[in-house]
Amino acid sequence: MIKFKPNFKSFQFKVTLALVASMLFIGGMSNFLIYKFSLDSQFNQLRDKIKMVARTAALMVDADLLARVPLSHEGANTEQYKVILEKLKKIKKANRPIRFIYTLAKTDQEGILQFVVDADPLMIGRGKDNLSALPGDKYNAARFPEMLRGFEGPSADTKLEVDQWGATLSGYAPILDIQGRTIAILGVDIAALDVFKVQNEILKRALFVLIIGIFFSIFLGIVFSRRITKPIEKIVAGTRHIAAGDLSYQVEISGNDEVAELGKNFNRMARSLYKSRRRMQNYIYRVIQSLIRIIEAKDSYTRGHSERVAEYAQKMGERWGLSVEKMELLHETAMLHDIGKLGIQENILNKKENLSQEEWELIKKHPVIGEDILRPIMLNPDLLSIVRGHHERFDGKGYPDKLSGDSINLFAQILSVIDAYDAMTSSRAYRAAFTKEQAIEELKRNKGTQFNPRIVEVFVKILEEEK
């Protein structure tokens, strides 16, 4: 009888052992890394989702009504409290993962907050004694920096937090009044058990991948991780666009899962913010137009100047082949370019005699004054650059920054030509109006010095085509 005795010293056995050990090590490490990465991704996704829920819920709360809730236990009997309470209950009902939802306001003590309205003020179902969340009840938030950051913007806990209310993962968002001031924060809690369920589900998936086999663990891990992180990366990219002011940006996420729903909610939020900003800008634009008309009403010689400049700017935009958005920007800026004259004394603007050097220096400040007036209310940096630069010269001898050539905003160069033409063909207190032909000759004479030659050529063609 021949007995098999494995040769543990053979090269074949050592290679086999090394390959098996390597595959086991790679498979085990890959599975562990995939599990850890998936856990972090799911947790961050959960944080993003709870922040989004908190922010959306905060927008649904009437800030002025909340501010009128008395911060004492008697406040729970007021009509304001009851209205806010019903709103919070509806939000909680519409978002099943939410266990608790509440509002907190600051106190005079640093790190100490106080409840305003809580959807569960008497701790029903929380399993705690002698705790309540009635108006005015204090809460020590010193250990929870994300809660305190909620007064500045949406935030969420970076880990499960444990306090007298239990273990939860919480998200927070500021509740803003009509002036944009934070009067309180809205918090939403997900119980630790729900978070553990998410973590357990990830663990089961990791074990399943491990059971299938070492050879497929790396492949499946990459596919699984990319499936999770790619949509999140898109949403993160979207938040960067929103933070940079691009409110028209939309993320593209397909599917019907929670991540896809988060993407759809993000797109709806971006569209809503974009529409709100456009409405606000249109309102501000109309107000500023009224101010421009006030300026021109003081001077019969320049009445209608902004409208004429804007009309020519529209024609230049069409001839230049600008997009609808760029043409709109050029037209709006043409209407607003002289807003800075609000800061110039009327007797200087209408002076018939030659201006003194001091008076001329004041006049030259109106582009900067216009930029300063518009900066707090206009989000478009191009518009501010055009208003500031519409008196720069192509040769660098203009004002206020003595820019030259292509360093001057293109639209500012266009307005410079149109503005000069309308000024020349309009009567002034100190001179008569130029004829159209005289003004055209003056534009041509200043090509390459005061004006961009190409812009002058296009504008002159427009003028010559007019009847």
Image (cartoon, rainbow, N blue to C red):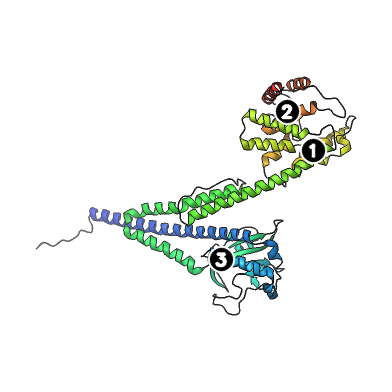
Disc 1, SS: helix
- Number of numbered discs: 3
Mark 3 or mark 1: name the one nearer the start of the chain: 3
Q: Is residue 218 left or right of residue 8?
A: right
Q: Which residue is mark 1?
A: 366
Q: Which residue is mark 2?
A: 417
Q: Is residue 249 left or right of residue 371?
A: left
The residue sitting at 53% across, 51% down in the picture is 235
Name, please, the residue furthest toward the left: 1
Q: Position of residue 176 (x, y in %)?
A: 67, 59
> Label 1 is placed on what type of residue?
His
Mark 3 is surrounded, within 10 Å at the Cα level, by few (under 14), some (14 to 19) or many (20 or more) other residues, namely: some
**Residue 3: image tag:** none
Q: Position of residue 203 (x, y in %)?
A: 41, 63
Name the quarter where the N terminus is drawn: bottom left
The residue sitting at 43% across, 51% down in the picture is 226
Q: Nearer the viewer, mark 1 or mark 2?
A: 2
Q: Given contact means CB atoms under 8 Å apart, are the residues at marks 1 and 2 in contact? A: no
Q: Which residue is mark 3?
A: 92
Mark 2 is surrounded, within 10 Å at the Cα level, by few (under 14), some (14 to 19) or many (20 or more) other residues, namely: many
Residue 40 vs 320, above or below: the answer is below
Mark 1 or mark 2: name the one nearer the start of the chain: 1
